Amino acid sequence: MSPGVPPDPAEIGTVEIERALSRVAHMLTRARQHDRTVVAAGVPVDRAAVPVLRALADGGGPMRP
């Protein structure tokens, strides 16, 4: 991408999808780390909920249109 040239929306979407998939893959392979984090935080959150909670935290605002 050249300076001054607006980014291609498809490219931005691809980057966001790759980032989300990377986070999901990381959490799926880190079961023991998750278990330690849950114990340390004292919050009972299953691993499947973590990507959803992370997306909500990263959103910075309402998720509804």
Image (cartoon, helix red, strand yellow):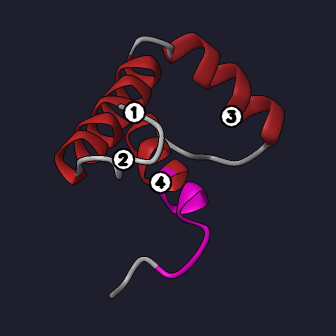
Label ID, residue 55: 4
**Disc 4 versus disc 3: distance between alpha carbons?**
18 Å
- For label 3, the crowd category at 10 Å Cα-Cα, with few meaning under 14, some 14 to 19 and many 20 or more, is some
What type is the residue that disc 1 sits on?
Ser
Tell me, yes or no, whether the highlighted magenta stretch contains residue 57.
Answer: yes
> For this view, does 17 lie left or right of residue 53?
left
- State the SS at label 1: loop
Q: Earlier in the sequence, mark 3 or mark 2?
A: 2
Which residue is rendered at x = 57% and y = 11% of the image?
Answer: 32
Could you tell which of marks 1 and 4 lies nearer the N-terminus? Answer: 1
Residue at image position (31%, 45%) is: 12
Q: Measured from the top left, where is residue 25 in percent x and y? A: 35, 20
- 65 or 5, which is in the foreground? 5
Q: Main secondary structure of the magenta part?
A: helix
Please, what secondary structure does the residue beneath circle 4 have?
helix
Amino acid marked by disc 2: Val
Q: Secondary structure at mark 2?
A: loop
Asked whether the beta carbons under mark 3 and mark 1 sit within 8 Å of each other, the answer is no
Identify residue for label 1: 2
**Residue pointed to by mark 3:** 38
The quarter of the displayed image where residue 60 is located = bottom right
Disc 3 is placed on an element classified as helix
Q: Which residue is mark 2?
A: 5
Separation of marks 1 and 4 at Cα, in angstroms:
29 Å
Question: Is the Cβ of the residue at disc 4 closer than 8 Å to that at disc 3?
Answer: no
Instruction: Please tell me which residue is depicted at 52% across the width and 54% down the height of the picture.
Output: 53
